[in-house]
Image (tube, grey):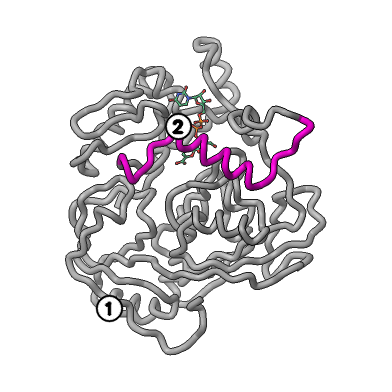
């Protein structure tokens, strides 16, 4: 762990750093000045200098939800703060924040608090929690990226969102130039949404404190997962769910090490019940899920698939053959190529269904 408040070693600087291997789309990108951030204590001095020099800056985690341009002028802060430690065992009540976590209604209130550096690989953390008998995050296995990036888009899969398991987040506030700890409530988690997404560049996340309830319950209600565990007399273990999620993801989603991609390229759009009723009368096979009161979430993958894009390719950019929500870089694509293809998808879906698809990855 490198959370101790000792005199900070300045962040290592590399000029003209190639980021092709630090973004899962595999885009060619050069960072003019890349800073290796290994400790939160490096941030105040660095941000002060960047502000004084009026230099552009951005933070890059694993680059798994990023569309990078060929040149990134100014400073790119590579978030590499590592380490994880259990800070509270057998805690009860609300822990050290005003967290209102309710990830399990039958929870006995006992929980473990686990503090994790923002640069830790997400999937490695999920595997680590299972190894240390702290189940809960298994539905989120194999999601690419880092722990610090996970809360920004509130990563979610197979009926679980990371925000449910977050107690609080330590961050550097780049406007007030102070370190802050934000409670789960303050993080304003929503579907692929959070305070950090609403206020880009204000907070640099340095450490996430997870709250893992002692009482564990399998979450297999998501249809694809439920199919894997159809025997009602045999309840799956967290490890079995982890393995099943890995199997499903490997079948449906492209491995970024093999073919460049950033997971779902679009969010599933929310429509009103009235819009939904009108669409379903025209398209009886429309796939949707109930959402907050008066709203429904449409499966964007279905809309794109029905428009005939699945498996299509324009130059180096394509729509993945097994999941229409995923755009892929077949090799040599630029961010502009990807955005142009994305725009043609948005246009066609809008013309056909009157629904606007929002782009999920961060456009740098
Ligand atoms: N569908 C199609 N054709 C496709 C893809 C999907 O018809 O090509 C229809 C199918 O009916 C399918 C339904 O859409 O049953 C939903 O598809 P899927 O289960 O693959 O889920 P999704 O809504 O497309 C979301 C997340 C994924 C997450 C899965 C599982 C978003 C934007 N995406 O996808 O997250 O893994 O659910 O929970 O919410 C990511 O964010 O990068 C990501 C992969």
In which quarter of the view is residue 218 placed?
top right
Q: CA distance from mark 1 to mark 2?
A: 47 Å
* Secondary structure category for the residue under label 1: helix
Give the residue pinned by disc 1: 52
| Nearest to N terminus: mark 1 or mark 2 | 1
Query: Does the image show residue 182?
Result: yes
Residue 243 is inside the magenta segment: yes
Using the image as rendered, state which of residue 155 and residue 26 is in the foreground: 26
Q: In this figure, what is the number of numbered marks?
A: 2
Give the residue pinned by disc 2: 252
Compared with 196, 245 (above or below) is above
Find the magenta span and give its range. Answer: 232-259
Q: Residue at x 21, y 34 (%)?
A: 316
For disc 2, the neighbor class at 10 Å (few under 14, some 14 to 19, many from 20) is some
Compared with 211, 176 (above or below) is below
* Secondary structure category for the residue under label 2: helix
Query: Does the image show residue 203?
Result: no
Q: Which of the numbered marks, if any, corresponds to residue 308?
A: none
Q: Position of residue 259 (x, y in %)?
A: 31, 39
Q: Is mark 1 within 8 Å of ligand 1?
A: no
In which quarter of the view is residue 11 placed?
bottom left
Which label lies toward us, 1 or 2? 2
């Amino acid at each position: 762990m490198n959370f101790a408040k000792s005199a900070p070693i300045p962040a290592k600087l590399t000029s003209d750093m190639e980021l092709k291997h630090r973004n899962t789309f595999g885009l060619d990108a050069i960072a003019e000045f890349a800073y290796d951030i290994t400790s939160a204590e490096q941030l105040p001095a660095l941000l002060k200098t960047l502000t004084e020099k009026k230099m552009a800056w951005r933070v890059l985690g694993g680059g798994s939800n990023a569309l990078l341009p060929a040149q990134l002028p100014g400073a790119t802060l590579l978030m590499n703060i590592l380490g994880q430690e259990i800070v509270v065992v057998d805690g009860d009540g609300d822990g050290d924040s005003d967290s209102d976590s309710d990830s399990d209604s039958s929870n006995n209130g006992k929980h473990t608090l686990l503090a994790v550096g923002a640069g830790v690989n997400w999937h490695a953390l999920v595997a680590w929690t299972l190894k240390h008998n702290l189940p809960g995050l298994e539905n989120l296995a194999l999601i690419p990226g880092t722990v610090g990036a996970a809360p920004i888009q509130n990563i979610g899969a197979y009926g679980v969102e990371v925000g449910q398991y977050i107690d609080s987040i330590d961050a550097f506030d780049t406007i007030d130039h102070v370190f802050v700890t934000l409670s789960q409530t303050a993080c304003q988690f929503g579907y692929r949404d959070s305070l950090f997404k609403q206020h880009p560049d204000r907070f640099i996340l340095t450490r996430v404190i997870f709250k893992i309830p002692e009482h564990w319950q399998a979450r297999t209600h998501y249809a694809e997962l439920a199919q894997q565990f159809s025997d009602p007399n045999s309840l799956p273990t967290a490890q079995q769910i982890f393995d099943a999620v890995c199997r499903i993801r490997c079948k449906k989603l492209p491995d970024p090490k093999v073919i460049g991609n950033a997971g779902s390229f679009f969010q599933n759009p929310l429509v009103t019940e009235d819009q939904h009723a009108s669409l379903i009368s025209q398209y009886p096979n429309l796939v949707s899920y109930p959402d907050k009161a008066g709203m429904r979430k449409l499966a964007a993958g279905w809309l794109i698939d029905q428009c005939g894009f699945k498996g299509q390719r324009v130059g180096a950019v394509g729509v993945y053959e097994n999941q229409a929500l995923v755009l892929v870089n077949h090799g040599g694509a630029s961010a502009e190529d990807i955005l142009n293809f994305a725009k043609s998808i948005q246009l066609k879906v809008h013309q056909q269904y009157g629904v606007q698809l929002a782009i999920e990855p961060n456009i740098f």
